[in-house]
């Protein structure tokens, strides 16, 4: 029998109170993060190397959507591994009404049994009590630059979404959901390498493939002059076109040496080991960045660390 001051084993008030306190702490932390555009930027900046203009523009748009009820659409262009999608993941960790949607396999609504662009609308909350939603449509260029009659159809569906209005979403004809897209902010992410190749042909580039700048960025003029992206689409990008610079070898060196951003430091904390890189290994990782980005460096390091842990799972120092 419990004493007068003890709770019986089935009394779960202590657990409930702990859960409530965690929720309160979480809300307080989120309130601090989203209190100003600068506080949002600070949160991003601690977690993502570079991408200054992208982080600044997104921070301002997020704050405005919460406090001023604005709706913003961005087009973010940059090579693979430059941080486009990573910033979306960072936001989703602290802002629940965020989703990342892969557009590389979408087809028009009229094509049965396929993934449609409007399905991304089902992954966010647009109810009256919800915070403004953010949808990051990844690899948007793979959908809009299809070499077939599908691209214009997908473009028309996307235009209706980003314009803002009521759209029926879902694949089940009898149970489609009516979604108010005026409460959704869209960030469209892509490399647009097809336009880059088209530009080379147009200007008669004759350099060898390995001498071309594979990380060069598509400019605003390139998009406006392209016959593949309509003026209606570009006109709805009210937040602007953000160009994220590629990660070059100089930036990769700075990244590896940075205490806050370095994937080496992150992996040391994750695996609780000290990691020492040989100069040859460092040069190898830096050389990978133009092709695979920061993600490639992280993946390569993790593979090497896993191999070392397999050989000695109790090691406190790994030399690569």
Image: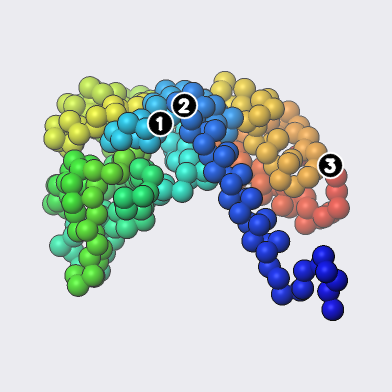
In this view, 123 is above or below 276: below
Sequence-wise, which precedes: disc 3 or disc 2? 2
The answer to whether residue 37 is visible is yes
Tags 2 and 1 in contact by the CB under 8 Å rule? yes
- Quadrant of residue 288 within the rendered picture: top right
Q: Distance between the residues labelled 3 and 2?
A: 41 Å
Q: Earlier in the sequence, mark 1 or mark 3?
A: 1
CA separation in Å, label 2 and label 1: 6 Å
Q: Tag 2, which secondary structure?
A: loop
Provide the residue designation for mark 2: 36
Crowding near the residue tagged with mark 3, few <14, some 14–19, many ≥20 C-alpha atoms within 10 Å? some
For disc 3, the marked residue is 317
Of circles 1 and 3, the one toward us is 1
Question: Residue drawn at (19%, 72%), measured in percent from left and top?
Answer: 174
Front of the two marks 3 and 2: 2
**Residue 245 % position (x, y):** 43, 25
* Front-most of residues 48 and 262: 48
Q: Mark 1 points at which residue?
A: 63
C-beta proximity under 8 Å, tags 1 and 3: no
Q: Tell me: 202 left or right of 80.
A: left
Quadrant assignment for the C terminus: top right
Residue at 24% of width from left, 29% of height from top?
238
Rendered location of residue 292, percent (x, y): 51, 38
Looking at the rendered image, the quarter that the N terminus falls into is bottom right
For marks 2 and 1, the one nearer the N-term is 2
């Amino acid at each position: 029998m419990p004493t007068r001051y003890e709770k019986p084993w089935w009394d779960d008030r202590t657990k409930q109170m702990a859960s409530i306190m965690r929720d309160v702490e979480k809300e307080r932390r989120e309130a601090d993060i989203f209190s100003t555009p600068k506080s949002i930027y600070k949160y991003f900046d601690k977690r993502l190397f570079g991408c200054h203009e992208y982080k600044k523009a997104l921070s301002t748009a997020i704050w405005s959507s919460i406090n001023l009820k604005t709706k913003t659409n961005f087009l973010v262009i940059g090579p693979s591994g430059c941080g486009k999608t990573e910033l979306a993941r960072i936001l989703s960790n602290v802002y629940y009404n965020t989703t990342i949607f892969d557009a590389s396999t979408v087809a028009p609504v009229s094509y049965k049994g396929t993934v449609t662009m409007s399905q991304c609308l089902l992954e966010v909350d647009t109810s009256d009590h919800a915070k403004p939603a953010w949808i990051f449509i990844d690899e948007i260029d793979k959908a809009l630059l299809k070499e077939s009659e599908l691209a214009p159809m997908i473009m028309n569906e996307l235009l209706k979404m980003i314009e803002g209005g009521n759209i029926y979403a879902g694949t089940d004809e009898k149970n489609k959901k009516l979604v108010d897209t005026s409460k959704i902010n869209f960030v469209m992410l892509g490399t647009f390498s097809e336009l880059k190749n088209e530009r080379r042909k147009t200007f008669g580039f004759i350099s060898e493939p390995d001498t071309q700048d594979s990380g060069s960025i598509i400019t605003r003029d390139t998009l406006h002059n392209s016959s593949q992206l309509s003026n209606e689409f570009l006109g709805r990008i009210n937040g602007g076109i953000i160009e994220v610079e590629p990660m070059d070898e100089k930036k990769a060196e700075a990244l590896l040496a940075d205490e806050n951003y370095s994937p080496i430091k992150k992996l040391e904390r994750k695996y609780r080991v000290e990691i020492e890189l040989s100069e040859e290994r460092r040069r190898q990782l830096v050389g990978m960045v133009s092709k695979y980005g920061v993600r490639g460096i992280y993946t390569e390091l993790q593979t090497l660390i896993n191999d070392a842990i397999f050989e000695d799972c109790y090691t406190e120092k790994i030399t690569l």
